[in-house]
Image: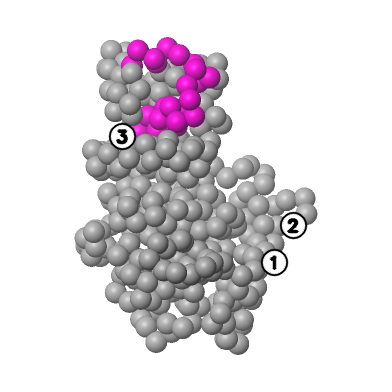
């Protein structure tokens, strides 16, 4: 599983995000959603993006597709490079060629992703019409039937409408729409949040099978550390709009050296092998994105906070391929 990280220096990354800053201009204040966000993704890599609600995970995904809400959301600094393409300076025509064809996204709620007055088959077909106009009608129909079978929906149901499907089946349709073009990168934004536990397991198993079949790179946005352990090669922990720890699943989950926030997340997970009466929650609340602290954004909640933490933002300190953005590791190699 470390292969993805070990070969990173020998190939151009598929996706590279550098020092990305994004904000939302609301009536009350400016919300700083991303604050120096850095991320590198290799071809075929499956990366889990973990963090609390409001940490900036979805904003990152929308930024990659240049889909931040117009007039409200904007990128103020940084760069996004996808397979050599400068995303932030790409033309509308170039972005149209990327979205849905080379980069696809699965959103949290399938109800908001499906048109209620168009049959599900036509909604999958629309992706092929837009991005592969050279395909014949017969080829498109065959491709739609193939992807629907792949996600576990009988092609005979493609003439039905979204309201005729359960929540889990709707999510399968959304996954079919995202994968029918066989994208190089799939952004999956908490794809099982709106589903019950049994259906969640089915959808995750389906995605696991599809990633092995198609070998697309994937960013899985989730709150569930257990899902990341089973599903991903690498993991990035996000807090207050920045990646504060990253590495292979083995390195981060070894729990020998972690960012204090990552340690707090692990301590919140029930453990069948301990006799603790209570879980250990992380005290306090995430940093206010309208008024971020001067130093480390986690300092007000950190049990290891020092005067330096309050005044100086930490760099990413590397141990091989394992990076931790914390002053406690300042003796390590700086990224």
- Mark 2 or mark 3, earlier in chain: 2
Q: Residue visible at 61% across and 82% down?
A: 311
| Disc 2: CA contacts within 10 A as few (<14), some (14-19) or many (>=20) | few
Q: Are marks 2 and 1 in contact (CB under 8 Å)?
A: yes
Residue lying furthest right: 28
Can the viewer see residue 14?
Answer: no
Report if residue 159 lies within the magenta region: yes
The answer to whether residue 181 is left or right of residue 239 is: left
Q: Give the percent coordinates (x, y) of residue 136.
A: 29, 15
Residue range highlighted in magenta = 155-180
Q: Is residue 48 above or below residue 271?
A: above
Q: How many C-alpha atoms fall within 10 Å of the one at disc 3: few (<14), some, or many (≥20)? A: some
Q: Which mark is residue 182?
A: 3
User: As rendered, which of 316 and 48 lies closer to the eye?
Assistant: 48
Q: Which residue is mark 2?
A: 29
Q: Position of residue 68 (x, y in %)?
A: 57, 45
Measuring 52% from the left and 49% from the top, which residue is drawn there?
58
Other-residue count near label 1 (Cα within 10 Å), few / some / many at <14 / 14–19 / ≥20: few
Q: CA distance from mark 1 to mark 3?
A: 41 Å
Kindly state the secondary structure of the residue where label 1 is placed: loop
Label 2, label 1: how many angstroms apart (C-alpha)?
Answer: 9 Å
Which one is earlier in the sequence, the residue at label 2 or at label 1? 2
């Amino acid at each position: 599983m470390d292969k993805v990280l070990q070969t990173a220096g020998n190939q151009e990354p598929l996706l590279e995000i550098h020092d990305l800053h994004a904000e939302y201009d609301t009536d009350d204040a400016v919300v700083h959603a991303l604050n120096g966000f850095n991320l590198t993704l290799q071809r075929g890599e499956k990366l889990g993006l973990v963090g609390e609600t409001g940490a900036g995970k979805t904003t990152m995904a929308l930024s990659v597709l240049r889909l931040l809400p117009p007039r409200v959301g904007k990128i103020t600094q940084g760069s996004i490079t996808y397979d050599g393409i400068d995303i932030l300076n790409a033309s509308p025509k170039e972005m149209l060629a990327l979205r849905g064809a080379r980069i696809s996204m699965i959103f949290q709620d399938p109800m908001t992703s499906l048109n209620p007055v168009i049959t599900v088959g036509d909604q999958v077909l629309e992706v092929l019409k837009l991005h592969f106009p050279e395909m014949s009608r017969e080829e498109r129909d065959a491709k739609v039937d193939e992807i629907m079978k792949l996600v576990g929906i009988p092609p005979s149901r493609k003439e039905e409408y979204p309201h005729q499907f359960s929540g889990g089946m709707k999510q399968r349709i959304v996954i079919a729409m995202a994968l029918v073009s066989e994208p190089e990168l799939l952004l999956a934004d908490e794809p099982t949040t709106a589903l019950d536990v049994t259906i969640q397991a089915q959808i995750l198993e389906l995605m696991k099978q599809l990633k092995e079949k198609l070998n697309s790179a994937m960013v899985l946005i989730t709150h569930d550390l257990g899902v990341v352990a089973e599903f991903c090669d690498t993991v990035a922990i996000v807090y207050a709009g920045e990646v504060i720890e990253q590495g292979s699943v083995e390195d981060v989950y070894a729990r020998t050296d972690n960012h204090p926030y990552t340690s707090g997340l692990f301590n919140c997970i029930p453990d069948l092998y301990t006799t603790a009466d209570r879980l250990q929650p992380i005290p306090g609340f995430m940093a206010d994105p309208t008024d971020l602290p001067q130093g480390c954004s986690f300092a007000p909640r950190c049990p290891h906070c020092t005067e330096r933490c309050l005044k100086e933002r930490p760099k990413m300190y590397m141990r091989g391929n394992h990076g931790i953005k914390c002053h406690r590791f300042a003796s390590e190699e700086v990224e």
